[in-house]
Amino acid sequence: MSVRPRWRWRLADAAGAEAERPTSPVFLARFDAEQWLGEHWRGLAAQGVRTATVEHDGQPQGTPIELPAP
């Protein structure tokens, strides 16, 4: 049995602490995770999220993406 990779976003506030809310869904493909962030970044920024880092099975992949303050 193979395990499908899991992708999610680590969403952090201005201080760098992981946000309790909102949270990222878990995706089976990085493309789907990136598409979700592209569709929701404005709402996330309005809720205080300042950075988003994509993780693959809990390991950061690449540099954090900065979300502008509203």
Image (cartoon, rainbow, N blue to C red):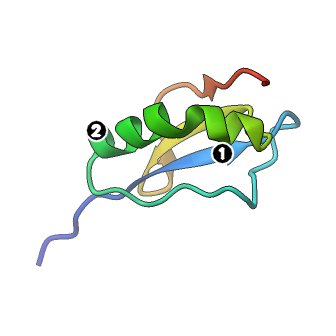
Q: Is residue 36 toward the left or the right of residue 32 in the image? A: right
- Mark 2 and mark 1: span between their CA atoms? 17 Å
Quadrant assignment, res 5: bottom left
Q: Quadrant of the N terminus?
A: bottom left
- State the mark number for residue 20: none
User: Closest to the observer: 35 or 8?
Assistant: 35
Name the disc covering residue 11, or none.
1
* Residue 61 shows in the view: no
Along the viewing direction, whichever of 16 and 44 lies nearer the viewer? 44
The residue that mark 2 highlights is 31
**Picture coordinates of residue 29, whole percent (x, y):** 26, 48
Amino acid type shown at disc 1: Leu
* Callout 1 crowding tier (Cα within 10 Å): few <14, some 14–19, many ≥20: many
Dot 2: element: helix
Q: Residue visible at 45% across and 31% down? A: 38
**Looking at the picture, which amino acid does disc 2 mark?**
Phe
Circle 1 SS class: strand
Taking the image as drawn, is residue 38 in sight? yes
